Image (cartoon, rainbow, N blue to C red):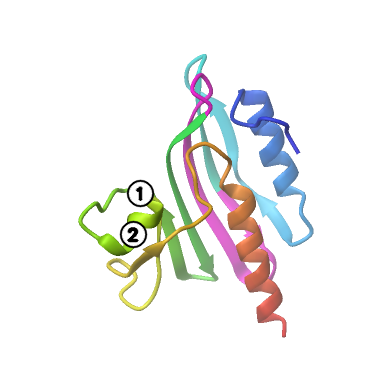
Amino acid sequence: MANKPLRSLGEYSQLVAELQNRPLVERSTITVWSDSPYTAVAEGELFFANGFRLRMREELDFDDQRITSYGYEVYRNAERLYWYDDFPHPNDPTLASTHPHHKHVPPNIKRNRIPAPGLSFTTPNLPQIIQEIEALITASNV
């Protein structure tokens, strides 16, 4: 894997390429493009076995080595299972431990939020999210 993927467009692109080659990934539309000498956008979908799909968008700042904004949505076929976002909810004390990172889950997926440990602005989130989806696929095969 890329050594410091948030350092440059090339290193982040390498990370994304490596993640797209995992055994349960069937295809990808994720592209990473630079919109200035120091920033980029990563956007698209990863299609997994058993109808699972990740839709994602990240805004990246290589000068600060950070993800400045993100959104990750996980589907099984047409059903949205859950999503992660970084929109702050400072008045929700249940999310304080990972503020502003959180996960929307059923029931009432729009309003039901839980902490998202492991998500960060300073390290790539895609490896963790892909591992989570791979675990769902494995569990669905049981």
Q: Residues within 10 Å of mark 1 (few under 14, many from 20)?
A: some
The residue identified by callout 2 is 95
Q: Earlier in the sequence, mark 2 or mark 1?
A: 2
Circle 2: residue type: Leu
Q: Nearer the viewer, residue 32 or 108?
A: 108
SS majority, magenta: strand
Q: Residues within 10 Å of mark 2 (few under 14, many from 20)?
A: some
Q: Nearer the viewer, residue 135 or 75?
A: 135
Extreme-top residue of the structure? 37
Name the quadrant of the N terminus. top right
Determine which quarter of the picture holds residue 9: top right
Classify mark 1: helix, strand or loop. loop
Classify mark 2: helix, strand or loop. helix
Name the residue rendered at 66%, 32% in the picture: 13
Determine which quarter of the picture holds residue 51: bottom right
Q: For marks 2 and 1, give the CA distance.
A: 7 Å
Verify whether residue 97 appears in magenta: no
Position of 39 with respect to 10 (left or right) is left
Name the residue rendered at 58%, 41% in the picture: 124
Magenta residues (range): 45-65
At which x and y percent is residue 93? 26, 61
The residue identified by callout 1 is 100
Depicted 26 relative to depicted 52: above or below: above
Q: Nearer the viewer, residue 57 or 127?
A: 127
At which x and y percent is residue 132? 61, 63
